[in-house]
Image (cartoon, helix red, strand yellow):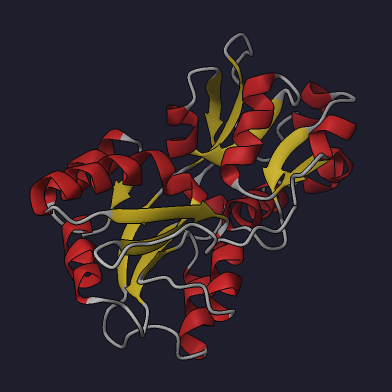
Amino acid sequence: MTRLWQGLCAAALLWAQPVSARDVSVFAAASLKTALEEIAADWRDETGHAATLTFAASSTIARQVDQGAPADLVLLASADWMDWLAARDLLRAGSRVALLGNTLVLIGSQAAPPLDPAPGFPLAERLGDDFLAMALVSAVPVGIYGKAALTNLGVWDTVADHVAQTDNARTALALVASGEAPLGIVYASDAQAEPRVHVLGRFPAESHPTITYPAALTVEARPEAAAFLSFLQSPEAASVFRSHGFVIHD
């Protein structure tokens, strides 16, 4: 298990990369990486402005913004962590929007047979002595959603000792893609971004809290950040998000 754990929970200084005066500094949940990079490229082509993207777990982003990281725009996978920032007066009043939704899925290798998440489903039997890759179940949204789903389906206690917790959804995805863990719980959008994994089953929506991605400007946001937030709500951006497996909020 040494390789599984090596570096998974190391804290990073998210504001280490330089940002030019014309850039918009965007701090976003790791699960948004593939889609947001494509949208940022489209926005640069249309406007000439660049979005400097920093990705991490929502909990890490929230704490770093609280510590002074120079973010103009924050996109999280958790309404709770956005509430946490709002309570500290770090968000611009009236700028918050519920941007996206997602689906929670069980993944395995391409050769793994289906396994439908349902009450009492045989997850422990499928794992055997191996590990289930999940993001941190007490701090990272996808990990919190995953634990809630397993608990509501009555199987958490059977697998709790076999969970390999990672610092974000994409790291959990990487463990399954590399074969270090045979099964994992991630967002549908994550699974779609990695051709080496296969969706074995989807968790019932009622088994976990609603997955919501809120976005908001920070109190120090530059004018271009508001324009980028508007672009994220455009039909063009919505098309990209859908193509990467996200749900668009009306």
- Residue 118 makes an appearance in the image: no
Number of callouts in the render?
0
Relative vertical location of residue 28 with respect to residue 104 in this rendering, above or below: below
Q: Residue 163, percent across and down?
A: 80, 41
> For the N terminus, which image quadrant?
top right
Quadrant of the image occupied by residue 115:
top right
Classify 13 as above or below 130. Answer: below
Residue 42 placement, left or right of 142 = left
Residue placed at 18% from the left, 43% from the top?
42
From the top left corner, tell me how far across and down residue 134 is, in percent. 69, 43
Find residue 83 and report its horizontal and vertical position in percent.
Answer: 49, 80
Residue at the spot 9% in from the left edge and 48% down from the top edge: 46
Report whether residue 147 is seen.
Answer: yes
- Asked if residue 103 lies left or right of residue 116, the reply is left
Q: Quadrant of the C terminus?
A: bottom left
The percent coordinates of residue 95 (x first, y second) are 27, 79
